[in-house]
Image (cartoon, rainbow, N blue to C red):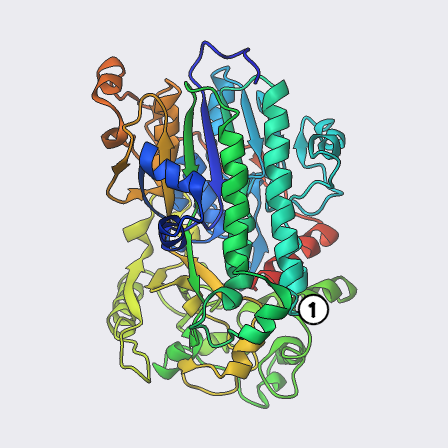
Amino acid sequence: MSTTASSARRVVVIGLDGATFDLIQPWVAQGHLPTLARLLRTSAWAPLESVLHPFTAQAWTSMVTGANQGKHRIFDFWERDFSTYGFRLTNASFRALPALWTLLSQAGRRVIVLNVPMTYPPEKVNGVLVSGWDTPGMGAAFTYPLALKAELPALSGGQPYVIVPDDWKYSTAQRGDMVMAELLREIDVRFTVVTNLMAREPWDLTFFVVSALDGAAHFLWKYHDPSHPLYDPAVNAQMFTEDPLLQVYQRADQRLGEFLATLPPDVHVLVVSDHGEGALEDVEIHLNLWLAQQGLLTLRTRGSHRSPGGTLKWLAAKLVDRGKHALYGRVSFSTLSRLRHLWPDKLRVTLGEESFFPGVDWAHTLAYSEEVRGNIWINLKGRDPQGVVTPGAEYEALRSRIISELQDLRDPTTGQRLVHRVWRREERFSGPFSERLPDLLVEAAYPDLFRPRGAYTGREPVRHLTVEEMSRRRITGCHRANGIFFAHGPAVQPDLPLAPASILDVAPTVLYLLGEPAPGWMDGRVLTEMLTPAALAAQPVETRPQAPPPVNPADGAGGAVQGYDEAEAQEVTDRLAGLGYL
């Protein structure tokens, strides 16, 4: 290890994307995960409550800024384009607040940042940065400094560098063995590179993310869970000698243990995840069908394409709409996206609208959802292109009606309530970008209950899928709200289970451990309950009063937002579709 910064406090944050105590604790009890078992004995630890909704882009961004989405702007992998009913992809340039490593770089501290989602394009730091999930392929300039990119194969021990595992490319081919091979390779490469970088670079903060555990849950759950409808012992036996999901966790546990052994005892270590995981079950909620059932959304009928502008919508609908003769069920979202550059601009705009909101008659629609999330938008005058709801009393009355009626949505088979709560956006978010967020957010047992209608031609808003329908899904596991948090080091009490912490608490806690004050705009807090009395007495918690940096709503933290070109957008879109997000 470099000793350049040995006199200063140092922190390592290890992100295990999607890691969950629901799997870790039983496997620890069975003796399968010795490193994580040791951390349970020697650390303060807690469930880590994620954001609403608990997906990668907004969760990691909230963690590294310590602020809610209304302040930092990243609400998902995409955001609304209010000039249409479409969306555009986001990346790190959309982030409106500085991340941990930005603040530390400004304070003269050295950082190593590796593979954290939503860090492309890479920003200039006092140290090195390799961008993560939103990187549009290996051809992009995804490192700072740029020369670091050419060094990554050597730093990887001769293996090709991995930004995102290619697990999703094998999921529809039913090649669970190839999925697992890709995930194991990513774990090995990530730990090898970070270990080699830390050996040669001075650092005060090292922050890196391993994404394999998330991919493992998405694609290997059906091979892991005997209660899953797609679990098939005969198929499993052909590919695996033991539970493949456990094997991925074991490899991560092994490499984590080897990595921790390289750290001196005065370094503080946090092991975190952005959300948990669980089974993707057979229930689906189609919010637009529910809204239509309530008379709040109108779908176009046959012949409506004869209206002005309707022919273009009819053509786009034929490409993506939900009918037995439509291309939607036979041509993938990513293929449709790839074809867009061949079409006139007006059709491309219309296709973007139809991709998320197929067949909607906007002039007779009060509320709508993109359905891939539990979000509801009010068709608002002055904001939406064909808005019909007046801001003020009419808007509030409509939101109240939807909240009241949707919270009673039930499983048609069991009668169980499916919705925990419907939130007004201002109940969860604050800040200059809150008005860019959905008007209502629907919180259910897990976010992937909300699914697009796909090839479904029925009108029931809640339904149970057949085994055949489930087999056509790309994923069999999905996100849950609670991730993991471990803290270990000289200022931390060992063997201390804590009450659930917020994902927003990570950034101010890291700054405290580094001896730096947290800016006043952070929404999280220092987790003082994990600290020793001696540490708190020696260093009382300090918050520096500080307003967020002024940000133009059209700009991100580094100035004007930097979108993707056609090829880059396609790379990211394919990845989103492959992982089941589109």
Percent x, y for residue 199?
61, 21
Query: Dot 1 corresponds to which residue?
Result: 336
Left or right: 538 as drawn, with respect to 311: left
Vertical order, 228 against 440 (above or below): below
Quadrant of the image occupied by residue 525: top left
The residue depicted at 49 percent of the width and 74 percent of the height is: 362
- Taking 449 as reference, is 183 left or right? right
**Which residue corresponds to the image point at 49% horizontal and 35% vertical from the top-left?**
257
Furthest residue toward right: 342
Q: Is residue 189 visible?
A: yes
Q: Quadrant of the N terminus?
A: top right
User: Which image quarter: residue 44?
Assistant: top left
Q: Residue at x 59, y 90 (%)?
A: 303
Residue situated furthest bottom in the rendering: 302
* Vertical order, 489 against 223 (above or below): above
Q: Position of residue 403 (x, y in %)?
A: 27, 68
435 is higher (above) or lower (below) than 555:
below
Where residue 427 appears, as percent x and y from the top left, is: 28, 52
Asked if residue 385 can be seen in this view, the reply is no
Q: Residue at x 53, y 88 (%)?
A: 301
In x, y percent, where is residue 524? 32, 36
Q: Secondary structure at mark 1?
A: helix
Neighbour tally class for label 1: few under 14, some 14-19, many 20 plus, Cα within 10 Å: some
Image quarter hosting the C terminus = bottom right
Quarter holding residue 150: top right
Q: In the image, is 138 to the left or to the right of 72? A: right
Tag 1: amino acid: Leu
Depth check, front residue: 246 or 79: 246
